[in-house]
Image: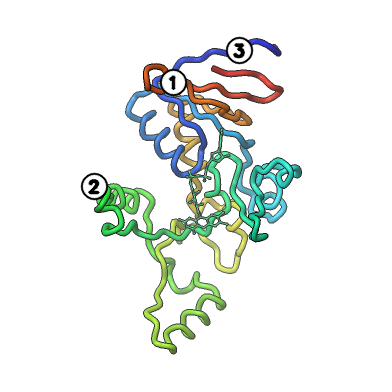
Amino acid sequence: MMGDIQRMKADVVVVGTGPGGSTVARDLTLKGKKVILLEWGKDVPPRGTAFRGGGEYVGGPGALNLHKGILVSKEQTLMIRGVTTGGSSMMYLGSAYDPDPEMWKPFGFDLQRESDEIKEELNVKPLPDHLIGPGANLLMQAAKDLGYNWGKFNKLINADKCVKDCNECMFGCKRGAKFHARDWALDAASHGATLINEAFCDEIMVENNTATGVRATGKGGVKYE
Ligand SMILES: Cc1cc2nc3c(=O)[nH]c(=O)nc-3n(C[C@H](O)[C@H](O)[C@H](O)COP(=O)(O)OP(=O)(O)OC[C@H]3O[C@@H](n4cnc5c(N)ncnc54)[C@H](O)[C@@H]3O)c2cc1C
């Protein structure tokens, strides 16, 4: 009801279901924590059409006005992001670049174990040659002819499910070949996490310098705390 606040309790509230949020939510859920996942966008299963990608993944037809999924910088550069379960992973290219250990060293992080773990779990590797398109092959050959060390990238794509010349995965892979963070958000939910779509986190509640909860606005203006 309007005016009422729906109060919920959890060990952890995760805001956003992109690769960052979904990974954390799934891991914590599998470790037995009670997790609430808040996602601003709607849940849209991947159908692999530009209509989906150009519309619902970027936050619906009002996306430009709402500064949701489509933004234009002052230099007139178009920037897009996915506002949907899975975040921008619903429309990414599936390329997987290893974190550079030298870059993280000054901050005291060593991500090697996590990187190895995720590569193993998601079977991250380059696509076999027959799945590399003619454009990419031409580019690779031209770069090699010019002396560049150009090779195939690791991909978050399961080659066994990928279909040659399908070319639709940019807007969400309907074949389940390309990894989407949506898979992990739904997996977290299937293991007991509460996933609330169309809920925008307005505020982090803080007591004694500790985050204790969030305030959010959901569908129809419902308020969550
Ligand atoms: C076209 C394109 C191609 C790309 N290709 C690649 C690639 O090949 N390889 C690669 O590694 N990366 C690629 N990226 C980048 C990659 O998708 C992002 O780095 C990644 O999705 C970031 O994950 P994230 O969880 O930090 O954020 P996001 O994926 O942006 O997810 C954030 C989520 O939080 C939600 N949210 C935001 N604010 C709130 C709020 N206040 N309340 C509730 N929910 C909120 C959003 O709706 C969204 O779902 C690509 C990106 C794009 C757009």
**At 51% from the left edge and 80% from the top edge, which residue is drawn?**
139
Q: Which amino acid does label 3 sit on?
A: Ile
Label 3, ligand 1: CB separation under 8 Å: no
User: In this view of the protein, which residue sits in the foreground, 145 or 171?
Assistant: 145
Q: How far apart are marks 3 and 1 (CA)?
A: 18 Å
Residue to which mark 3 is pinned: 5
First in sequence: mark 3 vs mark 1: 3
Label 1, residues with CA under 10 Å away: few <14, some 14-19, many ≥20: few
Q: Which amino acid does label 2 sit on?
A: Gly
In this picture, residue 105 sits left or right of residue 218: left
Q: Quadrant of the N terminus?
A: top right
In this picture, residue 107 sits left or right of residue 220: left
* Among the 4 quarters of the image, the one containing residue 77: bottom right
**At 69% from the left edge and 49% from the top edge, which residue is drawn?**
52
Contact flag, marks 2 and 1 (Cβ < 8 Å): no
First in sequence: mark 2 vs mark 3: 3
Q: Relative to residue 7, is residue 160 depicted above or below? A: below
**At 38% from the left edge and 57% from the top edge, which residue is drawn?**
124
**At 46% from the left edge and 38% from the top edge, which residue is drawn?**
22
Q: In which quarter of the image is the C terminus?
A: top right
The tag on residue 108 is: 2
Label 3, residues with CA under 10 Å away: few <14, some 14-19, many ≥20: some
Q: Where is residue 111 in the image (x, y as percent from the top left)?
A: 28, 50
Residue that lies at the very extreme toward the front in this rendered image:
74
Q: Where is residue 34 in the image (x, y as percent from the top left)?
A: 41, 21
First in sequence: mark 2 vs mark 1: 2
Residue to which mark 1 is pinned: 206
